Image (cartoon, coloured by chain):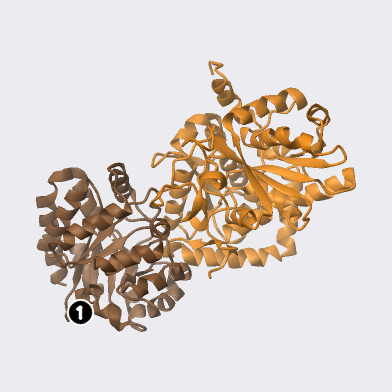
């Protein structure tokens, strides 16, 4: 626990009253060089933590926008090793907190021990695996912990009596899923997130960030008021889909506006 | 280790959003499994509506022609809707109804599971939506219209390889979206626990009947039972009650497509490796980075990159044997079955027939082999004609 707190993920949320803006993009979309460039742009715009998606052929928790990004990245030849190489290039220039987001199979197939050892080497502090629920986390937990990588727990609108069971064993941060369904922009988020976060707070002080469906500064501010931060994926990936290799300025402006909104929370 | 394990395989690798629903489903299933009223209702549906028990037919001409074991066909093709799929669907739809669900969703490859699900929904008065790979909606256009006639909404799935695995992805996504009033009626012995168990239990009626029927006809157990394997529901149903009969060989026939040494194959045991996908740990066709491979078979129902976890376990412990059968062999067997026994069987089932044509002579005439004829082949006639270069001007 203390070791995990020491790593970068802990620091993201450590400053009192600091609300985090967490930005997601897919490794290799549209090219590995662009991913490196866009990560640095997002850091410059104020993002506190960057979540890098390692593409998977069948991302069952993703909506169309991120599904398409996965396809673009894989068609461009992106691999797990390619994603590590992107991180290596980022690390030459930046110490921004980084997390991976991917599915169970790419990690399992790479070999959990080998995968998390590389994460540690490159200072990737956390991993989000949407198809690895509480019941299956022992698949990766040992290797992740041994290499000081937080295996992020997800809590969903349907979790109810599972919330505290999951929260008690959480590390790094807790990913609160705002809505039913898959990732993607939503005009309205109707889940009672306040009571979910309150229930989490009763059993742990591991920080909570809310993701799924967030795209506007207003939504991000609200999420940061309710929790410790907002996670945004599809809205950023959409900009990349539209502007391709020229997405840098638009990403910068967008992340800057979102970070400002989160800071006002 | 989590629940629903078969050796190292199985488990519940799904998003947290679905976990409570899976736990609830398991709890309700265990409850109704022991409820005599539920079992009586299901048995009535199977007997009075689906036409069970299905025949165990002695294929005399085939037996003579192949010159070895006495060949029997377990005629699941004679069930209502034309395949074994109805066994599982009636069970799950009835369960959904008892659970207070008003809507069922399902994936389909060849369309047989989709048609069966749409049928059960019509019968039990439930809303029904079917997800089918766009490529399969073209290969099996008649089945799409059949489902629509039955009142179902069919969604062509345009993501990924546009076949069965993508239909499963789409169904899982839709289920996370709307879980409260909806049951995902999974069509095979795959996916997260409790599905492999539930589907196996509902399909095990095949071997329960077949075991009794063969004892009545032959006075002894068969030397082998043979069935095709995609996800593996008809084969698991055919194997299940013979697992404890150690002298009965269990043989699963995988779709080799153009051959296991080509990229155009769907033979998971022959070419796959251990992985985690679609909620389960099992064997999958995948690349060196764990990306799921685009698989191929002439048969839309076997065109799946994985295999159910209980099959993976039966393979590990050597209790069942899995063999690849190519498109060519299956198409030949399809025609052979039509000419020899006057039965047009599903091209999926023809994979099992093809293997028995190879092995029958290795057995003596006082031994028997049962083939699970999992479905009828009307749906395949056009595709077989195309494969053999005949233009039907449909």
Mark 1 lies on residue: A14
Q: Quadrant of the N terminus of chain A?
A: bottom left
Which residue is more in the foreground, A115 or A54? A115
Which residue is more in the foreground, A122 or B106? A122
Which residue is more in the foreground, B7 or B359? B359
Left or right of B279? Residue A7 is: left
Q: Disc 1: which chain?
A: A
In the rendered image of this protein, which colour is used for chain B?
orange
What residue is shown at x 32% (from left), y 68% (from top)? A175
What residue is shown at x 58% (from left), y 57% (from top)? B195
Left or right of B20? Residue B315 is: right
What residue is shown at x 32% (from left), y 67% (from top)? A117
Which residue is more in the foreground, A227 or B339? B339
Q: Position of residue A99 (x, y in %)?
A: 27, 65
Q: Position of residue B178 (x, y in %)?
A: 44, 56
In the rendered image of this protein, which colour is used for chain A?
brown
């Amino acid at each position: 626990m203390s070791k995990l707190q020491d790593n970068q993920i802990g620091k993201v949320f450590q400053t009192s009253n600091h609300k985090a803006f967490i930005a997601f993009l897919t490794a290799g979309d549209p090219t590995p060089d662009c991913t490196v460039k866009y990560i640095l742009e997002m850091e410059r715009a104020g993002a506190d933590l960057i979540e890098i998606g390692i593409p998977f052929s069948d991302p069952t928790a993703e909506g169309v926008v991120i599904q398409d990004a996965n396809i673009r990245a894989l068609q461009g030849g992106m691999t797990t090793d390619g994603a590590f190489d992107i991180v290596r290039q980022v690390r030459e220039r930046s110490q921004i907190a980084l997390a991976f987001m991917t599915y169970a199979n790419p990690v399992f197939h790479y070999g959990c021990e080998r995968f998390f050892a590389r994460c540690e080497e490159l200072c990737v502090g956390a991993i989000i695996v949407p198809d690895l629920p509480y019941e299956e986390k022992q698949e990766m937990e040992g290797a992740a912990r041994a290499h000081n990588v937080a295996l992020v727990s997800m809590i969903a609108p349907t979790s109810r009596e599972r919330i505290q069971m999951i929260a008690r064993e959480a590390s790094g941060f807790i990913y609160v899923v705002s809505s039913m369904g898959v990732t993607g922009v939503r005009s309205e988020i109707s889940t009672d997130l306040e009571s979910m976060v309150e229930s989490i707070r009763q059993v742990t002080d591991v920080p909570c960030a809310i993701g799924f469906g967030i795209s506007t500064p207003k939504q991000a501010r609200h999420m940061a008021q309710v929790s410790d931060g907002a996670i945004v994926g599809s809205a950023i990936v959409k900009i990349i889909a539209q502007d391709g290799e020229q997405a840098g300025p638009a990403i910068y402006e967008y992340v800057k506006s979102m970070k400002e909104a989160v800071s006002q929370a | 280790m989590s629940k629903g394990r078969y050796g190292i395989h199985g488990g519940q690798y799904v998003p947290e959003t679905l976990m409570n629903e899976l736990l609830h489903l398991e709890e309700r299933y265990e409850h109704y499994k022991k409820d005599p009223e539920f079992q009586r209702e299901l048995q009535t549906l199977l007997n009075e509506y689906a036409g069970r028990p299905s025949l165990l037919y002695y294929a005399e001409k085939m037996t003579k022609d192949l010159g070895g074991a006495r060949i029997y066909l377990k005629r699941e093709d004679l069930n209502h809707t034309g395949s074994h799929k109805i066994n599982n669907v009636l069970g799950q739809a009835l369960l959904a109804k008892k659970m207070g669900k008003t809507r069922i969703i399902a994936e389909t490859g060849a369309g047989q599971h989709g048609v069966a699900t749409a049928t059960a929904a019509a019968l039990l008065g439930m809303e029904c939506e079917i997800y089918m790979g766009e490529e399969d909606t073209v290969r099996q256009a008649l089945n799409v219209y059949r489902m629509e006639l039955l009142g179902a909404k069919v969604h062509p799935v345009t993501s990924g390889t546009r076949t069965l695995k993508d239909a499963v992805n789409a169904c899982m996504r839709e289920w996370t979206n709307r879980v409260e009033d909806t049951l995902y009626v999974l069509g095979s012995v795959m996916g997260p626990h409790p599905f492999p168990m539930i589907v196996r239990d509902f399909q095990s009626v095949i071997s329960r009947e077949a075991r009794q029927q063969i004892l009545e006809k032959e006075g002894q157990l068969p030397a082998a039972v043979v069935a095709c394997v995609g996800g593996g529901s008809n084969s698991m149903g055919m194997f299940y009650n013979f697992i404890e009969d150690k002298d009965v060989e269990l043989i699963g026939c995988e779709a080799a497509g153009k051959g296991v040494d080509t990229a155009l194959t769907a033979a998971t045991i022959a070419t796959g490796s251990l992985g985690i996908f679609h909620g389960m740990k099992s064997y999958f066709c995948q690349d060196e980075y764990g990306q799921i491979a685009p698989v191929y078979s002439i048969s839309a129902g076997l065109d799946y990159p994985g295999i159910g976890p209980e099959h993976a376990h039966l393979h590990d412990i050597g209790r069942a044997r899995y063999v690849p059968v190519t498109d060519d062999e299956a198409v030949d067997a399809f025609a052979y079955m039509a000419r020899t026994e006057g039965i047009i069987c599903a091209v999926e089932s023809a994979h099992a027939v093809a293997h028995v044509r190879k092995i029958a002579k290795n057995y003596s005439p006082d031994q028997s082999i049962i083939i699970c004829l999992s479905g009828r082949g009307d749906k395949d006639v056009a595709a077989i004609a195309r494969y053999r270069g005949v233009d039907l001007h449909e």
